[in-house]
Amino acid sequence: MKNYLSIKDIDSLPKLVEEARELKKNPKKNNDLGANKTIGLLFFNNSLRTRLSTQKAATNLGMEVMVMNFGNEGWALEYEDGTIMNKGTSEHIKEAAQVVSQYCDIIGIRAFAGLTDKEQDEAELVLNGFKKHASVPIVNMESSTGHPLQGLADAITIEENKGKKRPKVVLSWAPHPKALPHAVANSFVEMMKLQDAEFVITHPIGYELNPQITQGAKIEYNQEKALQNADFVSVKNWSNYSDYGKILSTEAKWMMTKEKLGNAKFMHCLPVRRNVVVNDAVLDSDQSIVIEQANNRTYAAQIVLKKILESL
Ligand code: AN0
Ligand code: CP
């Protein structure tokens, strides 16, 4: 694997999930693979899981880790070519990416969608800017349009918890007071399209995700109908896509409850707002697998870093 920018960089999802589960049994087995190699993790946004699990994954492989909160502590970067930089930006991505490439053998980038300009978000200025100007592999730690490490961790979690060959998996939209990006939902959909499963997306009318991503996936606007006989329910808020970045209504009735969940396992990428997105009864029940999902972030990152290290 040369880079991990999206779910599309996975050759065979079942194989990668199997390898990740194998590695989970003995995480330190390959702790010489990353010897004398450094990963730099650049965060333009907050994080708990991504920051610690990717760091842990790299350490399990014997790598050195450098973490930088670029959003707060780095120079404001310029991404446009030919700009006269006499305004807010201090350093061009061209220099920044080349400089970081000299210190690191792999670069991880977290840069969320701004949710004001769809075209700009879809251009993935930060991720693609580093991809273009860095001379080392790039790992997406959640960009404007995708969170493929989360998608891979979700695939591992489903595999570990499924009781039948072809489970029913539902992605259910949830209310949230803040406008949130589409990245997690997008990667979940892209990952599910590679699975042998009955997959249904449910959300209020008007909350359609990018149709290029959901193409071929089933959308059911009636949440109750969508949830019938589900084995896994992954809950996530996202803001409007067509009226880009807006919250049309918080639709409190879309919150996940024990009654709606039935016998399904509950999934969420975290962080989650209790009693807004999902109620306490679900999160505190045995049906919630969110903690194991977060644990699997380590093995998702570790299998990706292992594949990249093997290709260096
Ligand atoms: C982010 C999001 O929805 O994309 C990160 C999730 C992993 N969530 C929040 O900002 C609350
Ligand atoms: N799920 C996830 O990516 O969490 P963080 O935002 O805490 O990294």
Image (spheres, rainbow, N blue to C red):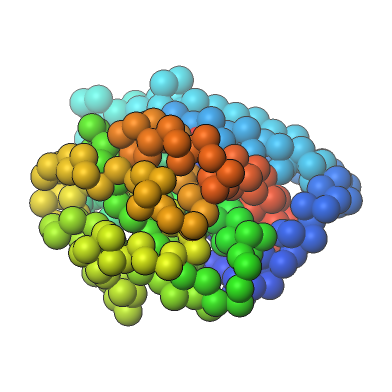
**Residue 148 appears in view:** no
Q: Nearer the viewer, residue 11 or 266?
A: 266
Residue 250, picture quadrant: top left
Locate residue 103 relative to residue 68 in the image: left or right.
right
* Residue at screen point 35% across, 46% down: 256
Q: Nearer the viewer, residue 192 or 137?
A: 192
* Residue at screen point 23% across, 32% down: 177
Image coordinates for residue 154, horizontal then vertical, percent: 54, 56
Q: Nearer the viewer, residue 26 or 79?
A: 26
Image coordinates for residue 15, horizontal then vertical, percent: 68, 72
Number of dots carrying numbers: 0
Q: In the rendered view of the protein, which quadrant contains the N terminus?
A: bottom right
Residue 310, picture quadrant: bottom right
* Residue at screen point 17% across, 43% down: 251
Q: Residue furthest top?
A: 73
* Residue at screen point 44% across, 65% down: 230
Q: In the rendered view of the protein, which quadrant contains the C terminus?
A: bottom right
Image coordinates for residue 265, horizontal then vertical, percent: 52, 54
User: Compared with residue 53, is residue 128 higher up or lower down, i.e. above or below?
Assistant: below
Image coordinates for residue 90, horizontal then vertical, percent: 34, 26
**Residue 212 appears in view:** yes
Locate residue 185 relative to residue 303 in the image: left or right.
left
